[in-house]
Every structure is written in C-alpha cells, then in structure tokens.
Image (spheres, coloured by chain):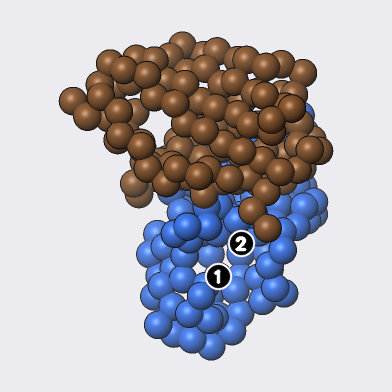
Amino acid sequence: DQQVKQNSPSLSVQEGRISILNCDYTNSMFDYFLWYKKYPAEGPTFLISISSIKDKNEDGRFTVFLNKSAKHLSLHIVPSQPGDSAVYFCAASRTLNEKLTFGTGTRLTIIP
Amino acid sequence: KAGVTQTPRYLIKTRGQQVTLSCSPISGHRSVSWYQQTPGQGLQFLFEYFSETQRNKGNFPGRFSGRQFSNSRSEMNVSTLELGDSALYLCASSPGGSSYNEQFFGPGTRLTVL
C-alpha cells in the first residue's frame, strides 16, 4: 500500500521556468512532509519541509505548498537551473519522531 | 564535519548467502535509519536505531536485522539472500529527538544478488 505517491516518474522543464513536482498521500494522520533531492551515486539530501499547521513554506528558490483537504503537496522551483536536475522524493510522517514514508520519486530534467 | 559513510559501496553476493553492511553516522548524531531503494518502489524504511535501541521498524521480514553500537555506528545484516534483495541500501543519521526527520543520508551500498 503506497501511502505516499508521486504519479509523475519524470518531468522536463526549460531552464529559467518553474518546475512543479507533485505528491499525494492517503494517510490523514501524516503531519510532517519533506522533500529530498537525489543525484546519481549520492544519498538523498534534505531540501525543505512543512508541517500541517502551515500551507506554505519558502526557502530561496524552493517553495512547498500543502493542501491538507486534498492530501496533496507540491514543490515549486523558481527559476529552474541545470543543477536542479535530479530525482526528487517527497516523504511524510505522523510525528517528528516517527519513520518517514517516501514516495517513488520524480526525475526532474532541466533543459538548458 | 564528515558526512555519513557507508561501507562497502558495492557488493555482489549469491542467493542464500548473508551480508553485513556498515554505516557511520555524522559525529554527534544518535539516530541511524536504514532504507532499501529499488526502481519503482522509492525508499522503503527498514528500521531506525536510537541510542543502541531499535525505535522504529518497517515491514520487512526477519531476515533483515540491524544493530547499533555505543559509538552510534550501525550495521545491517541480511541473511539467506534472495534475488529480490538486490537494491541500494541507504542509511541516514540525525541528531535524534525533535530533529529526527531532517536526516542526512550516506551514499548507499549497492547490493547485487546473483
């Protein structure tokens, strides 16, 4: 049972444009959501997180939006840069001390 | 500060064998989590150790086990290997407590079972 879903396995975006990566979840008990980025031959690196008390969190070019009623979150990258080409995973947990449940990832390719 | 290190980086085993993977967390981090990554499945949580105790556990069979030492280093063992165990095994460390979720990952161990 995939509780966190990333339905787009891949996404291509022109450099300078906005990249929007989507993530849906089924467990209404999830309260913390995170995005990780993974380059080949490296482990995932933490990007940005959001808790359910907020609907938006920004960090530089990265913004995460959370829609609890729709059980949906998205990551916006503006403007997209070639170095953003990577696999992006969203993850969720019920509490800060509980295990993370990851999605299957979306491969983002930024076209120069 | 040195990052999370995992050894070995690559491993080839045959069915029925057992394997032990090692993870050294970032200095000062007390929590170590293990994940299995396979194509199309994302990262599947195996277990988490905090201060030498297993604190969280995923839905993997008992062939997968782990432990943590007093210096926070962790090992993961898989016994009676199956072809389906071929995957990238990632470990992640965090200080523990309220910052658990912001985990720092190692580069992984690529296990191939023939």
Q: Which amino acid does the dot numbered 2 rest on?
A: Glu
- Which label's residue is closer to the chain start, 1 or 2? 1
Q: Is residue A95 above or below residue B59?
A: above
Q: Which amino acid does the dot numbered 1 rest on?
A: Thr
Tell me the chain of label 2.
B
Dot 2: few (<14), some (14–19), or many (≥20) neighbours within 10 Å? many
**Based on the displayed image, in which of its 4 quarters is residue A5 positioned?**
top right
The chain in blue: B
The chain in brown: A
Q: Is residue B8 above or below residue B99?
A: below
**Based on the displayed image, in which of its 4 quarters is residue A72 positioned?**
top right
Q: Nearer the viewer, residue A74 or B3?
A: A74
**Looking at the image, which residue is at 72% across and 27% down?**
A68
Residue B31 percent location from the top left of the image: 69, 43
Q: Answer with left or right where residue B25 lies relative to residue B13.
A: right
Q: Is residue B95 visible?
A: no
Mark 2 lies on residue: B75
Mark 1 lies on residue: B20
